Amino acid sequence: MNKVELEKIKKKALEEKIPIIMDDTLEVISKILKEQSPLKILEIGTAVGYSAICFSEYLKPNGYIDTIERDSVRVEEAKQNIKKAEVENKIHIFEGDAVEILPTLNETYDVVFIDAAKGKYPFFLKEALRCLNTNGIIIADNVLYKGYVMSDYNKHKQRTAVRNLREYIAEVTQNPNLQTEILEVGDGLAISKRKK
């Protein structure tokens, strides 16, 4: 992977206010991926490809990442970034709405990373569980959503997102087949492992 290009991609995204994974969040996920050494990762929400490029470093030699993005402008930028970072043989982008694409996937993945529309997290979880390997891990970013999720926040604008993120947290923490940690890094990270 071309680290120099990766830094340029990060800088440009931050300058253009494109939401990319925060450094402390990336640090936590990198540790998990290093331990896991996954063969296949599914990412829901590509944006400009930054997180997928970062994750690609931890794949097994013949491993790959499938990532889904519905914004065609972002897809084009992600493709260019992935090429610049010299990891185009490891990352495949599905262009379209994850709600439509996920049910069509018949692969199983070692890691599923959720970082897309907050209001859809419960649906993404259902699909992630369906696609997850026996020892797989589901990682969801932004689950505390600026602190709103754990407060009594009820403003109309973000109400659906907050309600659905609360539902997501309830589902992963109460599911008897999952062991879940909620970490207060970045904007909140939920790490759910399948119990043996």
Image: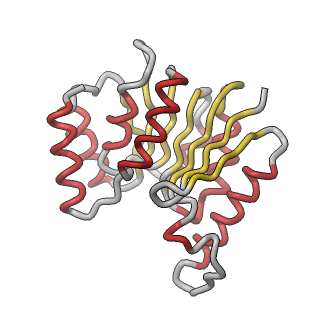
Q: Is residue 47 left or right of residue 30?
A: left
Q: Is residue 147 above or below residue 189?
A: below
Q: Nearer the viewer, residue 183 or 86?
A: 183
User: In the current view of this chain or complex, which residue is farthest to the top?
Assistant: 61
Residue occupying image coordinates x 59% and y 38%: 104
Residue positioned 17% across, 53% down in the render = 12
Q: Quadrant of the N terminus?
A: top left
Residue at the spot x=18%, y=52% of the render?
11
Number of callouts in the render? 0
Residue that extends furthest to the right in the rendered view of this protein = 176
The image shows residue 177 at horizontal and vertical percentages of 81, 38
Q: Quadrant of the C terminus?
A: top right
Decide which of 118, 98 is in the foreground and name it.
Answer: 118
Q: Quadrant of residue 192?
A: top right
Indicate the position of residue 102 as horizontal and vertical percent values.
58, 43
Residue at the location (35% across, 26% down)? Answer: 57
> Taking 21 as reference, is 7 above or below it?
above
Q: In this image, 103 relative to 48: left or right?
A: right
What colour-coding does the image apply?
secondary structure
Q: Residue 150's spot in the image, x, y percent?
A: 64, 71
Q: Position of residue 181 (x, y in %)?
A: 66, 47
- Hey, which quadrant is residue 121 in on the image? bottom right
